[in-house]
Amino acid sequence: MNFLNLIAIPLIARFCLVIMFPFSAFDKIAHWKEAMQQATSSFLPGGAVLIVIAIVVEFVTPVCIVIGWHDRLAAFVLAGFCAVTALLYHPFWNYPHFWSNPGEGRSHFWDFLKNFGLVGGLLLLVIGGIPVSALSVLNHPLSSAPYAGVASMPSTSTAAGNAQPCPPIL
């Protein structure tokens, strides 16, 4: 049961959370012209540079998150990427009556919400999946270990009677 709880389920959860990003990066490469059109649709200059940055973020951060190498930093960067792309490229509020009209506005609305759903999941990785104070996260931003000193963290007893903290969910 320890392998399942400590390794398999967190690994599968991380993989499922980030699986779309490498495919999105590959899509930007395979369909460069369409990616350029989308990149230049916002007010930001430098469409090609933005696409290259997006490709690097979408290839590198998921690998870091899955293998656990600077996973909190990678999750934070990817969460920021998702929030920025939602705000810049899915402005559903610009479409009048987006909810009642089955057009482009509704698809932007759902993409906007999906991006922020990903932001929430990624921020759970940033804090370690357990309730902690923001200060402890700021003191050890790259740590993958559970944060110590959390009074509400559950514990288990060993055969010797010593209490051991339970591992984090993710």
Image (cartoon, rainbow, N blue to C red):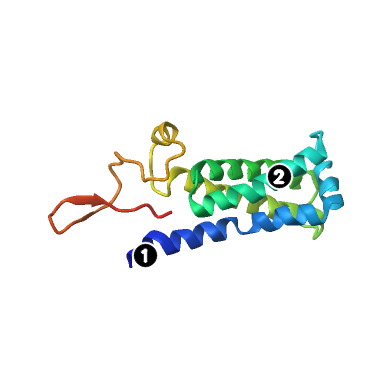
**Secondary structure beneath label 1:** helix
- x and y, in percent, of residue 108 in the image: 74, 52
- In the picture, measured across the screen, residue 57 lies left or right of residue 63, that is right
Q: Which mark is residue 54?
A: 2
Confirm whether residue 106 shows in the render.
no
* Residue type of the residue flagged with mark 1: Phe
Image point (81%, 48%), residue name = 96
Q: Position of residue 86 (x, y in %)?
A: 69, 45
Label 1 belongs to which residue?
3
Q: Is residue 96 visible?
A: yes
Q: Amino acid at mark 2?
A: Ala
- In the image shown, does 114 or 54 lie closer to the viewer? 54
Measured along the vertical axis of the image, is residue 52 above or below residue 8?
Answer: above
| Residue 71: percent from left, percent from top | 50, 46
Image quadrant where residue 8 sits = bottom left
Tell me if mark 1 has few (under 14), some (14-19) or many (20+) residues whose alpha carbon lies within 10 angstroms of its own: few
**Distance in Å between CA atoms under marks 1 and 2:** 34 Å
What numbered label is drawn on residue 81? none
